[in-house]
Amino acid sequence: MNTEPTFIRARSRRQVMDWGLVLASQGIDAAIVRENDTWALAVAPHEYDRAIKAVDQYVTENRGWKWQHSLPGSDLFFHWGALLWALAIGAIYYWSMVQFPQMKIAGAVDSDLVHAGQWWRLFTAVSLHADMSHLMANMTTGVILLGFAMARFGPGPAVLATYVAGVLGNVAGLYLYHGEHRSLGASGMVMAALGILAVQSFALWHKDHSARQLVARAFFAAVLILILIGTSPESDIVAHFGGFFAGAIFGYALSWLDPKRLKTFAVNFFCICITMALVAITWWKAKG
């Protein structure tokens, strides 16, 4: 009987370490071997086929550049696709402030005009900002919160859910403010991302009773953050709270769905297309 180990060669120390963890998760004993600048995993001959299959599956599932990365020293993941969102709202800011400054007036929420039939303002206002400081505040906070939400639920579902929740925050302001009301900004969408994160583990409440205290703490921590950054006197407080609670509702619904299905290419492509269509259609209405 052949007792000599067989080798699975890797290109680098990082790769051989990753593959070693993959095999360990499958209960396959493997030793890391280095000879000069060559790295390999040594496995028993009778485990070789199973080990190769596990490594091949890992490579297939992780092919290409990763948008999603774990944060060192934590159990959290961050999705760098949030930077594309930041670039998009930055481009719209330039377009609406420099190229076509009249679009800022055409796209902002104006309660009288919305009640008169210009419903699209509830959507277009989400992508507008009053000035550079307003833009940077939403951009910096939004990248962080959306990055976490995208990593949890996939970039497409996260962007679509937060965008619609931001619109619902504008709807709340339309009916809760007395008299004429004007507003604009992505802060409702940003607070919606916070709301999604606040409830992203609520499905554990019913699956694991021991997790209830942790889930409750996470929710109240998010509420405290909302109060801390969302209640400044010059901000649209109703839109912030409306976006947060609308996002929390969407996040609760998404938390019951299979994360693997939410992160498939088809689901994310569909959600991104719906979001882009809503932005394009509403701005086309505003321009007309």
Image: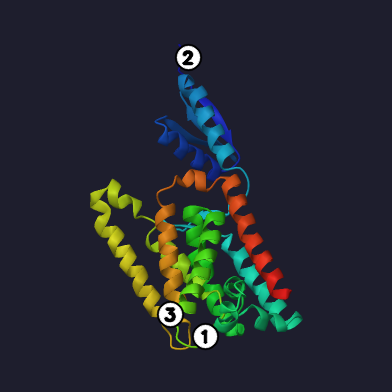
Drawn side of residue 279 relative to residue 137, left or right: right
Query: Which percent across, then down, holds residue 118?
Result: 62, 75
Residue at (56%, 45%) from the top-left corner? 264
Disc ID at residue 138? none
**Residue that badge 2 annotates:** 2
Disc ID at residue 181? 1
User: How many neighbours does mark 1 have within 10 angstroms: few (below 14), some (14-19), or many (20 or more)?
Assistant: some
**Of 76 and 196, the residue lying toward us:** 196
Residue at the extreme top of the image, as rendered? 1
Residue at (34%, 74%) from the top-left corner? 224
Query: Which percent across, then down, holds residue 73?
Result: 41, 59
In the rendered structure, which amino acid carries the disc numbered 1? His
Give the CA distance from mark 1 to mark 3: 10 Å
Query: Which percent across, then down, holds residue 173?
Result: 47, 78
Q: Is residue 139 visible?
A: yes
Give the CA distance from mark 2 to mark 1: 81 Å
Label 2: which secondary element: loop
Give the CA distance from mark 2 to mark 3: 78 Å
Label 3: which secondary element: helix
